[in-house]
Amino acid sequence: MLLGLAWLAPLVSFVAILFFGPRMGHHGKNAAWVATAAIVTSLVLSLAAFGTWLSAHPVKAVSHGAHHGAHADGHAADAHAEQGGHAEHAEHADHGDHAEHHAARVPAAYSGDWYTLYQGGDLRLTIGWYIDALTVLMFVVVTFIATCIHVYASGYMHDELHDVTDHEVHLSDGGHLHRPGRFPRFFQALSLFCFSMLGILIAGNLAMVFIFWELVGICSWFLIGFYFERKSASTAANKAFIVNRVGDFGMLIGLMALWGALGTLHFADSTVAAADGSAVTTPGLFSLVRPAANGHALQVPDGMVAFANADEVGRIAAEHNGRPRDAADEVAARIDGWRSQGIGRWLLFIAGVGIFCGCVGKSAQFPLFVWLPDAMEGPTPVSALVHSATMVAAGVYLVGRFYPVLTPDVLLVIAIIGGITLFIAATIALVANDIKRVLAYSTVSQLGYMMLALGVGGWSAGLFHLVTHAFFKSLLFLCSGSVIHACHTNDMRKMGGLARVMPWTAGTMLVGCLAIIGAGIPFVIGLSGYYSKDAILAQALSYSQANPSWSILYYAVAGGAFLTAFYMFRLWFMTFAGTPRDHHVTEHAHESPTVMVAPLVVLSVLAVVAGWTLPGGFGIANLIEQARPAGTDTTSTGGFLFGTVTVPAEHLSHEGSVHVTATLTAFATAAAGVLLAAAMYLWRIVSPTVVAYTFRPIYSFLAHRWYFDELYDAIFVRPAFAVASLASGTDRGVIDKLIDGIAWSARQLAGLDAWIDRNLVDGLVNATATATWNAGLELKKLQTGRLRQYVMFIVVGTVALFVLASMLFRAALAG
Amino acid sequence: MSLLAAGLPVAAVPLVAGLLSSPVGVAHYLVVGAILFTAGVVCMALKRNALGVLMGIELVLNGANVNFVAFSSPYLRGEGAASLGLDGQIIALFVILLAAAEAAVALAITLNFYNNHATVDIDRAEDLKG
């Protein structure tokens, strides 16, 4: 499929740059071309796939009034779509005759496997795909933004083409670090990132998602730590990686809960040719949790009920000892009873929350959001691509993809986390002075919006905001990169009046700011953010009407909208409006080169139009609606943990009164925010310093980012250090001492042994030698060299022997 | 012989007288051999000339030969000896043979010694002193 090729193109680029990067032209200059060519190929293929998709699935307006009527049809269509999906698969498996029956109906999602990594028993790990409208749309968005950013980065990173002197690294000898440029490495990591990100999007099962999830994590680590000689950068990279591991641990728990209870991680049903050639269909997660037989309503799957009630199942198996079929029948018969008792719902809750934990880490949600602002140590194109538009959106995407499996309780957890995140991040953004940090906190806050939207049942609202946010946030980041490129500083207090020297950047950034606050003329037209944010507000309002006890979520959204407007325009006014505050900074400022400005313009156009719905119903919102999981378009009620929770159907939020209230609220809050920002930073009616002084405790609380870093430092880092130092103390004081003692005594023993060897054994040997030597010396004297004397010795000796012998003989004879 | 006899202690006089008065037997041969042997040893011990020493060696060996032959002679042995009766002669021949070989080697050494030291005085031959 086209998307498969689009997915693999960046991998080719990654491998190519990995092996040939330094040899690509002068200092690897052509690496940028390779990477850009690959991502453009991906974009073209994605667009082709998009076109193919649109021709097969014409996007129609979802009429609000007729929705209920169309509802029943929707179910039917969904049911057929599932079967159609198998037909598609069967077609791949060369069973074309089956496909003909379904050729008339168009499936809403395609799935299948490219490659089976491992198969044994129930265990089946595959590299597969699950493609619906959302996948196609996200492919286009990701490849498009990635293309813009590749082009932009080839300009932004040109410093890396030759040797670099890093003025932010102070060596011990007082100088600055001087190192070779790392241009190819940057594009290599970028390509790997694109590959991994597209892998998450296309993944057909959770195991594959997890693989690519970790891959984008490591890419993020590479890219944040690109200037790894800077302590702040390497620390930030490690922080991001470690904080993400915390979330991924939860995700692993979720995966295990699903795997252990259900034995599959596939999203969709999968058909495998059995040994005898017949096709065996294994239900995937979606159809297990929302079986078509049950009208796609959420229920705890049989496997989970049985798993949670394992003792009872074991008892039944023991009763039917030797008759497993009977035991299985009895279990099957009693499953519904157990389900109605609520057995297994905890397991489903844990699975959902576990998967959401991974998303909390990746999408920088409370309480794991602390890594994202630090991640801004990476080069700005990275911040734009990885840490605002795509990777952090992967968490939201996964929640959206996994949405059918999430119970109302899990959704409430998600909504609460999203609400807390959006509020905390927005308040911190109010007082941040680093231009990229403001954007980072705004990213966190907007991700909170998306999570909240998903949590309150606004499935398409959240994903719609994900798409529009990807456009305007990457635009904002690239604009900030352009500003930083011109000013060589991140500090907004030193900027000001840049609109005159950088008109294009200022204009496009203004568009981005307007888009993020959701500016628009109510009920007429607006920028992209206007539509997506209104949808979220409306859904939150609808939710709070359905669950009055949780109406705080709606106020969080509305308050967040006000704060967003304030801090975004604070940023714009401080940077571009007024007069320059620091002439050193602004006098060298200049508009960025065309290669950097062009992506800004392209993205700003998209930030404006991405939310529009053309006459005839063509628009992103309706496209996403196509991918809506079966059974999630109705109001559902459930929950056991926080009391009964009602998740209102999303189309209810398009009803007149809710919609009007939400739109007016959004407009009013955004306008109020902009006006307040203008009053403080443009017209200077209210002095920011006076306000900061008046509310000093609050200000310093916010400026210290709610003391989250300090809190985590105190709760986790310090105890970890304490445990580590305790362990190292034990190691050093006890274990090492013990080993040292053993070594010492061994050494003493060896010394004793050596003494014995040296004095007794050697002494004996030496004494023998000395005695022999001395005897030799004495005997030497006999060797006079006088022959006649020798003869005399012989004679005397002979005579003496003779005499002796005669005497002995005589004695013997006498005896 | 008389000189030697005159030099002998008085205790030896009856022995010599006994010999002179009895018919020639083994004892007489042994006396001749002993005189030869003693003359050779004295020659070896007293001569400083290497050739003289060699001659002394010949005398010693021949003294021994006389003894061998004397003990081997059928006239000198008792009756009934169950042997061929040539043992002593054969050993004497071996001794002569060895003496010839020894003389050849010794003369070669002496000649070399003379070449190196321009003398055959064995008191100068101290090179092998320990």
Image (cartoon, coloured by chain):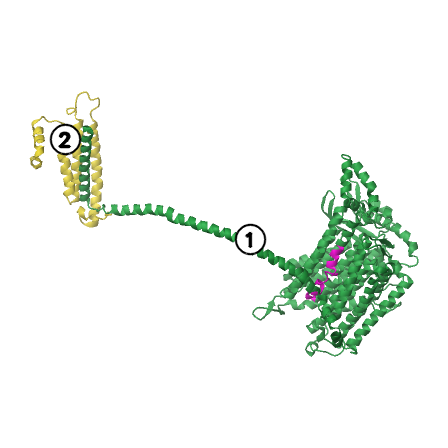
Residue A456, by quadrant, is bottom right
Residue A45, by quadrant, is bottom right
State left or right for residue B87 relative to residue A720: left
Residue A758, percent from left and from top: 39, 49
Q: Is residue B63 visible?
A: yes
The residue sitting at 49% across, 51% down in the picture is A743
Q: Which residue matches tag 2? A: B30
Circle 1 or circle 2, nearest the eye: 1
Q: Secondary structure at mark 2?
A: helix
Chain letter for green, please.
A
- In the rendered structure, which segment of residues is drawn in magenta? A355-379
Q: Is residue A646 above or below residue A473?
A: above
Q: Is residue A118 above or below residue A418?
A: above
The residue sitting at 79% across, 39% down in the picture is A328
Q: Secondary structure at mark 1?
A: helix
Residue A79, percent from left and from top: 86, 49
Residue A98, percent from left and from top: 84, 45
For disc 2, the neighbor class at 10 Å (few under 14, some 14 to 19, many from 20) is some
Q: Is residue A223 visible?
A: no
Q: Is residue A239 above or below residue A492?
A: above
Chain letter for yellow, please.
B
State left or right for residue A79 relative to residue B70: right
Q: In this view of the protein, which residue sits in the foreground, A517 or A512?
A: A517
How far separated are the C-alphas under marks 1 and 2? Answer: 95 Å
- In this view, the residue farthest toward the top is B80
The circle on residue A735 is 1
